[in-house]
Image: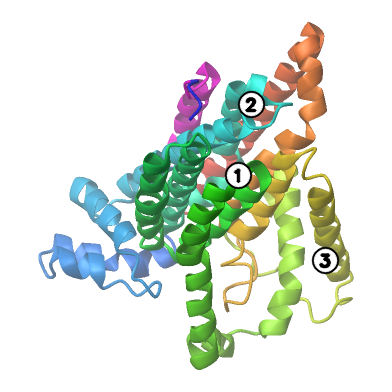
Amino acid sequence: MPKRAYTFHPVFYLALAATFLIYSVGLGGPFILDDEFNLAPLKSWLAGQIGWREVVFDNASGPLGRPVSMLSFLFSAWIGGVYPYHYKLGNLIVHLGCGALIALLLQRLLRKDARLSAYATVLAAGAAALWLLHPLHASTVLYSVQRMAQLSCLFTLAAVLAYVCGRERLAAGQLRAACVWLFLAMPLLWLLGMLSKENAAVTSALCLVLELAYFSRDARARKVLAWFYLFALAVPLLAAAVVVAVKPGLVFAGYELRDFDLGQRLLTQPRALMAYIGLFLLPRGSELGLFTDGFAASTSLFAPVSTALSIAALIAISAFAIAWRKRSPGFLAGWFFFLVAHAVESSILPLELYYEHRNYLPSVGLFLALIALLAPIVQRCQRSGAARAAALAAWALAAVALGFSTYQQARIWSSKD
């Protein structure tokens, strides 16, 4: 295991404070849409009409009931009653926690890239700061019920971080410690993520992405990892395939209520993914928000033509990431982290076509990929004080721009109108 300490750069603490102040503007906003359905049992609990077990275990939002999320809502209700402020404050606290885990995870990963290791701490802090401030996440933080997505992200990040810790110990020959991380800590955190929201199902696949990008494997490592991925990936995939084959209605019945079918959804998602990337790189207030009914379904490869262009772009970027995997493991890891993290809500399930909150976890991969693309600039900063000053100025400008855009979104979310 590496002996270097993993700490937070001071810039990260400044970002935490700035994020809290910016989002505090929107904490007084109202409940909306799915909030009423999911949080209604809390009012009954506060009135003494039902017990806490009904609140925690009788939710019907997902197949697993999401009891961890409901327990967290119960805590918010216990503190603040029926007022939205305390629910949104809880979301903001989870958001800050996710940012901290991102900083720690990226720091460990960047230290494995020779081009970036010298600046791993500051790069990880800078990326986590921009993630915290990015307006793409405003509708996740300030929409109370999206704490489910937040907690799923929190525990998924913690599980992936546990996997990385276990792999570092396995590489260092510490077999017992490695097995504790891989076969105890990681599955427990994964389970908590699944019981928050089912998006966490991708956790073991995300671990595999990082494994292929960053780690080498000797005979002992292969044996341990074979058992890990047998139970963490192969068995769950086989079980899911059996469920789809035996009872397809459990997965596809929802299409009866949609104005698009499975084929149209699959054709549409590449356009959605490219739209998400566009908002990540250049967030535009007019295109941010909760109401996305205007995102039309693709009916064929060329209707609209952006369907074929988006598919071609995704294939080209993936091919580039694979071809450059040895030179830029961070780009490979970040790009496929983004794609895999979208695998639940951007694939076959009969969900709405487009929601920006689906990027809460996947955007971590985009930040990692972006850092890898900027590696030549980082190397130049190692040799030139002027380059370092320019890079710092560019980062500060991006942070201010993102923070201001998020502030504008928070003001909108604070308004009942």
Viewer-closest of 270 and 116: 116
Label 1 sits on what residue type? Val
* Left or right for 379, reference 232: right
Q: Earlier in the sequence, mark 2 or mark 1?
A: 2
Label 3 sits on what residue type? Ile
Name above or below for residue 9 compared with residue 81.
above
Q: Which residue is mark 3?
A: 311
Segment colored magenta: 5-28
Q: Which residue is mark 2?
A: 123
Name above or below for residue 416 compared with residue 108.
below
Q: Residue at x 47, y 47 (%)?
A: 141
* Left or right for 392, reference 91: right
Q: Which residue is mark 1?
A: 364
Q: Main secondary structure of the magenta part?
A: helix
User: Residue 12: x, y in percent?
Assistant: 52, 24
Q: Earlier in the sequence, mark 3 or mark 2?
A: 2
How far apart in space, not on screen, are marks 3 and 1 (Cα)?
22 Å
Viewer-closest of 67 and 133: 67
Q: Quadrant of residue 245?
A: bottom right
